[in-house]
Image: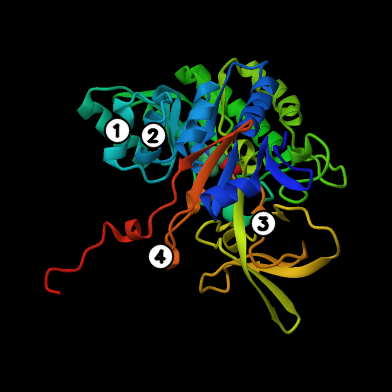
Amino acid sequence: MHSFRYVKGQLQCEGVALASLAEKHGTPLFVYSQATLTDHYSKLDRALAPLDHLICFAMKSNSNIAVIRTLANLGSGFDTVSAGEIQRVVDAGGDARKCVFAGVGKTEEEIAYALRQEIYSFNVESEAELKRISKVAVRLRRIAPVAVRVNPNVDAGTHAKITTGTYENKFGIAFEQIEGVYARAAKLPNLRLRGLQMHIGSQLTDVKPFQLAVEKVVPLVDRLNRKHGFDFFSVGGGIGIVYRDALASGDPAWWLTKEGKKVLTPQTYADKLVPLLKPLGLKILLEPGRFLTGNAGALLTRVEFIKKTGKKNFVIVDAAMNDLIRPAFYDSFHEIVPLKKKAGATVSSDVVGPICESGDYFAKDRPLAKVGEGDHLALLSAGAYGSVMGSNYNSRPLAAEVLVNGTKSAVVRRRQEIADIWENEQTAPWQ
Ligand SMILES: *Cc1c(COP(=O)(O)O)cnc(C)c1O
């Protein structure tokens, strides 16, 4: 389902006109749709109904506590990557016992915190980490539930910066070494070998790489389960979403491109994977991030200037790469549309921010409705890896965030005050 659409020429999120939110709260402004979050979670949850499963929302994609609360209320668990993220779950009223904890560099303090919170499992990325978790667990007199992350060496065929399942990146342990690692882990004190985890990459729009990886890993899970008595197998995240034509007519637009081409749907995903996973008889964990949050959010921005240079038409907006870094970082495409629908011909435009970097752009040579100073635009599909990657570069305050639910809206992060940007800084005593 897609909750951003034009109604009488006005772009709305659910029942709220985005122009009214931009006027009321200013820009840049992230807007999230609770209905979309709920719909995407429920579709995935329903598709997986034949399996005993737990969806662990990869909250690194969007960790606003109102987003966490929305998903926690639906029964979601959480895939976390730091003590800070676990603390957010606790603070938002989520259940730490439904958290898994991933990441290649967990500190002793983070491990201790996670143990005290009784998380579901550590997703372990190295043998050194297994030893560290064991050591901390012994010290705290607790049993640490662990799952090792297997690197299945399957190419997800996605952008190099978001592929994780091949031997050229830092994640997980090589497929061939896994059984040896478990045998040694079984000898370490205070560990409970609870499962196995994999994750092959992000923004996968084809089910094939998932299928190949699961086919390869399932026999390994089965062997390890017989030996060590597992509870679960986590197939990771990575289900991709539509970025181009995100506003295409029709429902459910978010998985149909304008050409009617279907990208990965929860049902396709389940149809291919459930038959492979079901015979394991284990709980299946999923760690979707972008799939749940990507198309649930938009970034609203105001046009400051139109600048024509040579052949180029620059639309200079008040949002920048510090608010949404994906185009600069991953060459990502975000659909850009005016909040008030414009008739007439489009103009080939570069949409750029005010930051002093050539990389500070949102679109290049993009056919865009003719807009002028003061008009508002929405960058769609900005709900995942948007606000969470925000920074104060150029001493720009972090944007505000609003959650919409039907005709209601609420600020879920207030705009940062400029003076707050350097509140932790001080001059040196000799100055
Ligand atoms: C980032 C990440 C995810 C989520 O990826 P999406 O592409 O947003 O679904 C899941 N699991 C792990 C281990 C990750 O690092």
Rendered image: mark on residue 5: none
- Earlier in the chain: of badge 1 and badge 2, it is 2
- Earlier in the chain: of badge 4 and badge 3, it is 3
Determine the residue positioned at 58% across, 69% down: 359
Element class at badge 3? strand
Looking at the picture, tell me which residue is in the foreground, 425 or 236: 425
- Decide: is 425 above or below 291: below
Distance of label 3 from label 2 (alpha carbons):
34 Å
Label 3, on which residue?
377
The image shows a total of numbered marks equal to: 4
Label 2, on which residue?
86
Residue 351: x and y in percent read 66, 66
- Earlier in the chain: of badge 4 and badge 1, it is 1
Q: Would residue 281 be found to the left or right of residue 120 on screen?
A: right
Residue 74: x and y in percent read 55, 22
- Earlier in the chain: of badge 4 and badge 2, it is 2
Tell me the amino acid under the disc marked 3.
Answer: Leu
- Decide: is 375 above or below 3: below
- Residue at the outermost right position: 259
